Amino acid sequence: MTGASTYDLTGKRVFVAGHRGMVGSAVVRRLASENCTVLVADRRELDLTKEEPTLRWLEANRPEVVVHAAAKVGGIAANNNFPVDFLCDNLALELNVIRASHTVGVQRLLFLGSSCIYPKHARQPIAESELLTGPLEPTNEWYAIAKIAGLKMCQAFRRQYGDDFISIMPTNLYGRGDNYHPDHSHVPAALIRRFHEAKIVNAPSVSVWGTGTPLREFLNVEDFADACVFLMKNYSNDLPINVGSGDEFSIADFAATVAEVVGYEGELVFDTSKPDGTPRKLLDSSRLRALGWRANTPLRSGLAAAYQDFQKGYGRHLEVRAAT
Ligand code: GDP
């Protein structure tokens, strides 16, 4: 079953929950070229981890479409160190946004998950049918369990009430608006920052976590936002749908590419005291491709744009380090 289905966004009110994050902000940018009204709520105005205010806000603003991009996210270390935040905050966000969306009669909801929902030793490339066929990767199981629960909520609301709620599973994302925290970020942002700082001080070597052998697929966040809008308009099914680029690299090759883009010429030293995480994570995105969508940003140009974005906000990123 392809899940092909047509939905007209014209004139619709679209609420992007989590519009300040890397994904939410990219979705807002992408929606600007659609003929719809984008609704956002600042965290000071609305705390989505609170049930009542979330329902009241949705009742007052009456969106027809909701993109649930609000999530507590982070890299391998953050997941390991803050299990309560990753499990409980994400469950609260999902329950409040999804249930309130049902209550106010939202026509279409996009729940954004993650490729880490799949088992650690899933068959590669990972098809959607691999879900819940084996144990999870322990370094991010808190986040994965929360995201699986969100996906199941969408399926449950569809089954019990016929709600048109869909779940989208992106591969590893990078790009504009990423979190450059030195310890809590994902590998693209972490290496952009570390290599940039090493270049500035002419450091002879710089560390890369793990053995360098894990394989990861990377997708630019602007491409992902484009896929979200595409699926909003063209997909309706209770199966989650994978969104990947098909571009897979070892962490060693990926790190070498980041170093080239940043212009760092020193040595890369692999710190094997740090975790590798899951050995391979390549999504099977053939269902999405069959619907007619594919990624179009090559890694190198996507990383170059991300590096420019990082440099523009460099002062801000330094403040992040000072404050946390
Ligand atoms: P994952 O895909 O859920 O494992 O998320 P990450 O983006 O955090 O890590 C991807 C891979 O990059 C793992 O094998 C990490 O060990 C490796 N890696 C190498 N250097 C770094 C780094 O500085 N930060 C992070 N987060 N990962 C790194």
Image (cartoon, rainbow, N blue to C red):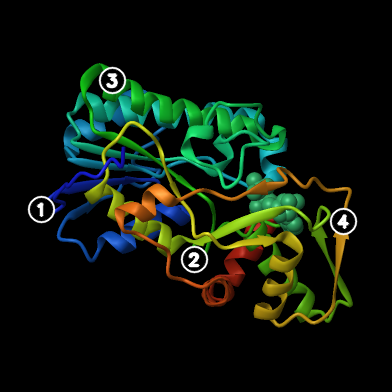
Distance Cα–Cα, label 3 vs label 1: 28 Å
Distance Cα–Cα, label 3 vs label 4: 47 Å
Seen as rendered, the residue at the extreme top is: 160
Q: Is mark 4 within 8 Å of ligand 1?
A: yes
Mark 3 or 4, which is nearer the eye?
3
The residue pinned by badge 3 equals: 159
The residue pinned by badge 2 equals: 176
Q: Quadrant of residue 116?
A: top right
> What amino acid type should be assigned to the residue bearing mark 4?
Asp
Of the numbered discs 3 and 4, the one sitting upstream in the chain is: 3
Of the numbered discs 3 and 1, the one sitting upstream in the chain is: 1
Distance Cα–Cα, label 2 vs label 1: 28 Å
Label 4 crowding class (10 Å Cα cut-off): few <14, some 14-19, many 20+? some
> What amino acid type should be assigned to the residue bearing mark 2?
Arg
x then y, percent, for residue 18: 40, 46
Of the numbered discs 2 and 1, the one sitting upstream in the chain is: 1
Mark 2: secondary structure: loop
